Amino acid sequence: MIRFLRCGLQCLVGMGCFLTLLLFDRSAFQTFREPKFLAFVWIGGACLLVWSLLLFYQAVQKKSVSWPPSPLIALIPIAFIVGIRFWDIQNGITTSSFEVDDIPLKIHYWIHVLLPSVAWLILFSVSSFCFRTSASQRKLLGTLFVALSLEVVIVSLEMVQNQTGLQVNPVSLLSQGEIEVFGQTVKERIFGTIGNPNWVAGYIAVALFPVIAWGLVLRNRWMKSMVFILFLISLFVLVSTRSKGAFLAVTIGFLHFGIIAFIYFRTRIRPQSANVGFSRGIVITVSMLVFLVLSCGFLMANRTVIGEGDSYLAHWAETLALRGDSITVRALLAHCGFEMWSHSPWLGLGPGEFKIQFLDALRDLVEGADGEQIQARVARLHSLRATHLHNEYLQTMVEFGIVGLLFVELFFIWCQCRAFRLILETKNWQTALLRVGFLSGVWAGFGGSLFDYPFHRPAQAFLLAVFLGVSISRPFGYVSGSPSSIRKLDRVTVIPFVVFSFLLSIHLLWQSEAKYVGQHLGFWGRTSLEIAGGDRNKAFEALATAQDMVPGEGEYTLWLAYYYLTAKRDPNLAIRQLRRARETSDNPNRVLLEATAQLERNDIQTAAQLVRFVEILEPHKVGVQFQKAQILQKQGRWEEACRAYLGEIHNAQKSLAKGSPHLEKAYLQLASILEKEIGQYAEAAKYYRKFLELLGDRIPTFPEAQLRLGDLSLNRFHDLDSAESYYREALEIFKKNGSAQEADEVEKILKDIQNRRNQFE
């Protein structure tokens, strides 16, 4: 039974290597990230469930119990910090306006954020228990080899497809993905459906080192050759991604691998006792191949699209000189992070609070003494949805303070010391080298954490938890002592731990299921609100259900606010939802949506402040100029309103992929102001006609443009034929919509036009 349950844990971990890498769900708000985190939490819950059954069986059979690894003790203060934050919220010390089931909404959000961290610790603990033998570690490496091969092959096919135009990638043929590039045009050309290339590069950087160690200890020449080929292709793909963070991760990983392996072979065994030497010819050949692959990767990365003048090497030179967009963006995020950290330096702001408070902190910086300098840096941000600081260490310090960062570092130092001691005490050099590979993969993650956020990417975080657990796993028989001396202690203490583990596993499984259902309901509700003809009542029911199932997820709350504003025309309910969204959503669109709601309430001053803030951060964002024009129009500043409407039209035309939901109304409002307030009738007629061109074959509910063009043609341009044509279009629309009174009025105008024509004749 113990072997069966241990095998089940190993299978779950192996399955997780594939799920967190390849899982893609189109019915999700954040297409590549959220579904993988749900899989992460589900795998963690399933592992904990099997582990609790195993512990219970061991207790019943009076066998010694394998407890979680001792380095977890270092994280106990983190639990106290989180508990203090929960206590502050629950007792009103930290303000929280909303409650769900008598629990403050902020606590729901923190639980939502912390669940992947809990799953990470479970996977770390389970891996330290179920991969204690060399045979089990080799099976894991075989699984990892297949997963890495799939990733590299798909990426290589994607590169071929994007360079040649041939449809050779099965992922794109099945329409299973889309890229997130955040304005990185070169990466968009090299890659396509695989997602953000930085994520791909980070995964390769972490997974590469255990596979390298496995290849070095393999005896089968064919398998050794396949591992070497995979290593070369992985290097080529990694360099081609242009990910500097992944390049730094690989460099640090290789340094760690070389140093630890050198120390082991110099201190633990004599070189001649292990057949690990290589001839000079093999070393030279391998070095030349690696150099050739790196050169080809740099050449691929150096291929620039039309309009981009700088080469990849020039970008590297900028980075090394601490200049360029990459450094500027990270410097701005770090500056903002330090400003946020200064408000609570010892215990931090709380889990996940950086992305929630980022916009407000950025607003304070922009409106501060150095606002002009900050604005120039803000313009280089790829997205205002800065969910992470691109530096795991600073992120931890902002959210958990200096105390939290110290204990997190203590945890990793403890793990490193334990893994290093186990490596030096291992007599079999092959087993020791495998441990070095796992530990070097973790160190690649540490290196990437300086410039990126690998511990917040599901596929990479999963591997880092497993690798760290395997690297500190003690072989069977390592602990000395009589089993009878610890049976009584195990039987007394293991039952509460088993009960707690069982309940926690059920909670994790239930939460992952609830989040999965909520994702689909939320996606369906959002889509129904966005598309023309969608059932808005059912959309509301779906979004409300999703919000009740996962109250800590702010996207559903944000779209409910959109529903109240656009479908119900109730700005008060919308603002209440938006205030709730402030506690749980990092979506910057909530600011512009709140400006729209305030404008509906005729609170022009508040709306103007919100629009001005968004305009500073994203001057070319679709919708900003429209809201600005609405405010100026209410203030009677007609010429400025016209310029703002023209700006919205220009921004919408530049953003061809998304367009603007306000474009039609912008044309109508602009034409109306030009006609009625400024008196530029020819210009007004031009924009009325552009509105009709944009409308196409769709039939409006009210033919305002046709009526105004008919009036202008009749009374200003004295063009009876055009006037008659526009009025007849308006008449047909009124008849189709059943507006009998309006149709009679138009018929009277048409009779008047006919009388005028008869008089002229």
Image: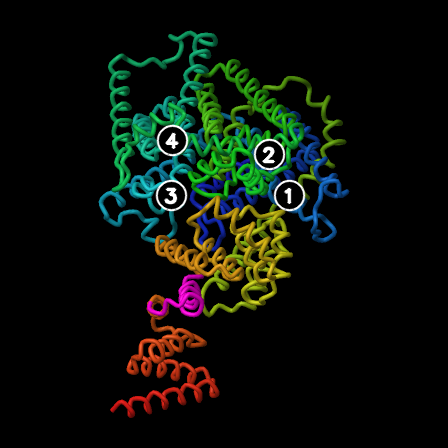
Q: Position of residue 39 (x, y in %)?
A: 52, 45
Q: Earlier in the sequence, mark 2 or mark 3?
A: 3
Q: Amino acid at mark 2?
A: Met
Q: Label 3: state its secondary structure.
A: loop
Q: Position of residue 373 (x, y in %)?
A: 47, 34
Q: Which residue is mark 4?
A: 324
Q: Are marks 4 and 2 in contact (CB under 8 Å)?
A: no
The quadrant in which residue 156 appears is top left
* Mark 3 nearby-residue class (10 Å; few <14, some 14–19, many ≥20): few
Give left or right: position of 128 versus 718: right
The span from disc 2 to disc 3 (Cα, nearest Å) is: 27 Å
Which disc number belongs to residue 183? 3
Q: Nearer the viewer, mark 1 or mark 3?
A: 3
Q: Earlier in the sequence, mark 1 or mark 4?
A: 1
Q: Earlier in the sequence, mark 4 or mark 3?
A: 3
Query: Can residue 397 be seen by looking at this rendering?
Result: yes
Q: Label 2: state its secondary structure.
A: helix
Q: Are marks 1 and 3 in contact (CB under 8 Å)?
A: no
Q: Are marks 4 and 3 in contact (CB under 8 Å)?
A: no
Q: Which residues are magenta?
A: 662-682
Q: Amino acid at mark 3?
A: Gly
Q: Amino acid at mark 1?
A: Ile
The span from disc 1 to disc 4 (Cα, nearest Å) is: 37 Å
Which disc number belongs to residue 340? 2
Q: Label 4: state its secondary structure.
A: loop
Against 215, residue 668 (above or below) is: below
Q: Label 1: state its secondary structure.
A: helix
The span from disc 4 to disc 3 (Cα, nearest Å) is: 15 Å
Q: Which residue is mark 1?
A: 111
